[in-house]
Amino acid sequence: MEHPVCHLNDINGDVLGDIMARSDGLTMAAAACACSGLRDAARDQRLWRQLCHSTWPSTALPEAGLLISSATIGGYDKFYANSFPLIAHGKSIHFTDPKNFKCPELKTQVSASHFASLVDIFYKKDCVFSKVMDGIPQATDANDDKGSECSPNVSTDDCRRWYSNCPFKLELLSLENDEGTGFEGELGYADNEDEDHDLGHNANDEERRGLLAMAVAENGDLRHDHSKELEENLRLSWVLLDKKNGTTVNLSSWKPLLVQRSWPFNGDYVLHSGSIIPVEDSLLHHKLAKCKIIIRCKPTESGGRPNWREISMQIEDITGASVGGSKSLVALNHALDCLRSTNHLEVEKGYRQYEKKQREVMRKKEFQENFIGGFYVSVEVAVFVTLCYFCLFF
């Protein structure tokens, strides 16, 4: 019986490299399993570096190159293999070899200095924002007495306790609203008890119309809803890198999971992306943590790239409450070992399953609170009736 011969081995290596350079990561990985010639061509780190730069422009920044090329990461091919798939809640598949998958080990303390973030935002398929953040600013390293960034008047122990209990929020970009808009407070109807109430009411109407006209002049036509436009055109990648162990994970959902206006009069929109992280029950109840990535932006009337107001990330439990700094770092450490998928529809489906469970938990919590509240009211009524009875007859 004749053995099949792979004629690709006779092709010049430069030609194979040029063919590989025109392929995506999944195609290159599959081709590497075909024959030894393609496998050798697919191991070329220059191809994977080029692919990573086109997929995540932040990897082309000088600070990112030093992190990825380090011995712990293992090269651009390992970075791509771990960063391209997204965390899939409720799935049991992974992009890498499942034999190498290890169950997450619960750590009570995780160093913030071990993490680095590579963030890229795309709008209409063009990269409009890229940034590399080494470490987590304002985070106190529980294992390093020199890691404190607190005030000199505050002890290191107090700073650690503050960060441990303070809601975790990693801000990549934070800008205040435009000055002079005048819409940071609530607009309501003023109480007018004067005799000329009608005149005051008309004056309030004129004032409100004037404020609305100012808002339109400042922010464009507020009646136009940009939610659909942002949902279709904006994409986000947030790669978390563990410099100590050389592992990476993409915390985003790629597509926005929620798009809504933040306030009717300032023209800002809030977009949510993120992932669901399974954790130990000793860390959070219901064994789930939500990594929520928040983008606040202001679309332009010309249809160009939005003006960014905020890009941040925080960790929440299933009730929507913010998680403290220490527990959030542990949850992020768990994310590095999460199961993942390259199917974005499965990722979104897992997120919707989490939302369904979240609604069930909130309904149960509301029922318990109402039951306890009703019980206390019943006890108070019973005590009141008993006291009235004794006061009337004794």
Image: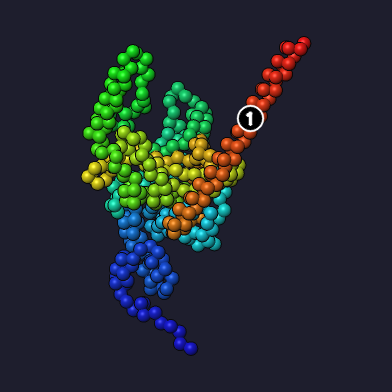
Up the image or down, 180 lies above or below 101; here it is above
Residue 71: percent from the left, percent from the top?
42, 54
- At label 1, counting other C-alpha atoms closer than 10 Å, the crowd grade (few under 14, some 14-19, many 20 or more) is few
Question: Toward which corner of the image does residue 188 lie, by quadrant?
Answer: top left
Which residue is pictured at 38% across the width and 62% down the height?
25
Which residue is pictured at 43% across the width and 83% down the height?
4
Which residue is pictured at 62% across the width and 29% down the height?
373
Q: Residue 178 or 380: which is nearer the viewer? A: 380
Q: Residue 92 or 345: which is nearer the viewer? A: 345
Does 217 sit left or right of 392 as displayed? left
Residue 342: percent from the left, percent from the top?
44, 59
Question: Furthest residue to the right?
Answer: 394
Q: Can you see residue 180?
A: no
Which residue is pictured at 31% across the width and 15% down the height?
196
Does 96 sit left or right of 221 as displayed? right
Q: Could you say whether the residue bearing mark 1 is in a helix, strand or loop?
A: helix
Q: Residue 278 or 188: which is nearer the viewer? A: 188
Kind of residue at disc 1: Gly
Q: Circle 1 sits on which residue?
A: 374
Q: Residue 386 or 24: which is nearer the viewer? A: 386
Residue 370: percent from the left, percent from the top?
60, 33
Q: Can you see residue 38?
A: yes
